[in-house]
Image: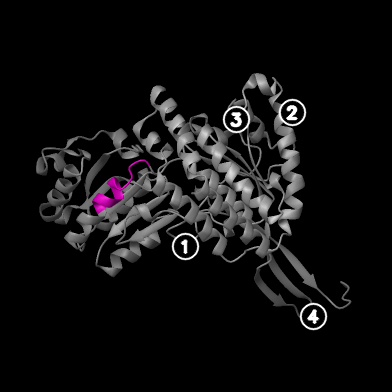
Amino acid sequence: MMLTKAEVGTDIASLMAKIGAKARAASGPLAVASAERKHAALVGMAEALIRRKDEILAANAIDITNAEEAGLAASLLDRLKLDHGRIRAMADGVRAIAELKDPVGEIIAEWDRPNGLHIERVRTPLGIVGVIYESRPNVTADAGALCLKSGNAVILRGGSDSAQSTAVIHAALIEGLKAAGLPEDAIQIVPVTDRAAVGEMLKGLGGNLDVIIPRGGKSLVARVQAEARVPVFAHLEGLCHLYIDRSADLAMARRIAVNAKMRRTGICGAAETLLVDRAVASTHLVPILGDLRDAGCEIRGSAEVRALFPDAKPASEEDWSTEYLDAIIAIALVDGISGAIGHIDRYSSHHTEAIIAEDAKMVERFFNEIDSAILLHNASTQFADGGEFGMGAEIGIATGKMHARGPVGVEQLTSFKYRVRGNGQTRP
């Protein structure tokens, strides 16, 4: 249950220190918990989510009403809203995580040295993960389940807009922990909406946080990346590009373009810029843009795009670096694969890019020369999701180059240690 500042008192630092200490105490037994016990807890969580679906929907209705009264943007309302299908998907995601191979203790590599030493590199939990998120109540279940599977304790700080939903979902997760005999403090939520709690997490809770993962808008992620004193897994923006090559199958390109932009416009994998090879502008551009327009998308294009498709609005320089998270897309014509790569290199946030092409050489250039976390060929950018990668779910997308990149799933929530076995060796 969320508490008011008056109920907690003014000492947010003390409250957060206690949460950190509880997480550290829980992390020890969780790190050595058996795969069977973690599996049982996750199955129990999924069942509890379904049992509590009416309670979750009632809580979510309160959140939606409050958010609408506060003027929350439509894209954020979409992220916030739950229905029976989304609750079922949440539970299915937890079950999928339960069925994944337990990463803890997995031998990643092993080798023998000439002196007889046998060396193993073994997966271990990170320890304690802090997740700070906005508008997405499903992150509560995804993050809690992924951290449990990977042997990590987690501290969840959801946004004030999803406070009611988060509290009920968290209660379902605790049911699963209790039923399996695992420490309830393994998954904690910050019980206040005061922003000072975020500041305490960014300081590391006295050394009790090992990594922070932000899920939210650009301002939240920028603050976390600027102020955090512990490692951060994050992406600042999802400026995703879809390139239509001269070798693209037109029917396929039309289907994928609409899906990449319009399936869900408010997610980080939604395409924000469409690039079309100038060589097929006369055959491919108008049908694709017509489909997008008919699907309700606002089109912003360069002058040559507008000459071919007058319904497009003028695109400014700012449009090429804007993550709309809305039914808006920027369109440009480029000189083949080289032009596409040049545009993406200049404007991309290194999240997700896709190419529609039948020419294998163009695909290989796209894959080899573009440095983004996720690259797709003949598929929608909306597949940039841990669940679609077979990870069960994801705790976020990371675009950095250290440790984790792309969807952050159970393997990415582990580190490793070395085990060295000898039979009496000493170093000369």
Q: How far apart are marks 3 and 2 (CA)?
A: 17 Å
Where disc 1 sits, the SS reads loop
First reached walking from the N terminus: tag 3 or tag 4 = 3
| Mark 2 → mark 4, Cα distance in angstroms | 51 Å
Q: CA–CA distance between discs 1 and 4?
A: 39 Å
Q: Give the magenta part as a residue range.
A: 257-266
Inter-mark Cα distance, 3 to 1: 34 Å
Q: Which of 239 and 370 is in front in this view?
A: 239
Horizontal arrangement in the rendering, residue 218 relative to residue 157 (left or right): left
Q: Is residue 423 visible?
A: yes
Query: Element at badge 4?
Result: loop
Label 1 vs label 4, nearer the camera = 1
- Which corner quadrant of the image does residue 130 belong to? top right
At x 55% / y 36%, what residue is drawn?
A: 158
What amino acid is at disc 4? Gly
The quarter in which the C terminus is drawn is bottom right
* Residue 14 circle label: 2
1 or 2: tag closer to the N-terminus? 2
Query: Is 386 colored magenta in this rendering?
Result: no
Characterize the local packing of mark 3: few (<14), some (14-19) or many (20 or more) Cα atoms within 10 angstroms. Answer: some
Residue 81 rendering spot, x and y as whole percentages: 41, 38
Other residues around mark 1 within 10 Å, as few (<14) / some (14–19) / many (≥20) = few
Residue at left offset 10%, top offset 52%: 282
Which numbered disc, 3 or 1, marks the residue closer to the eye?
3
Q: Name the residue under label 3.
A: 2
| Residue 145 horizontal/vertical position (percent) | 58, 52
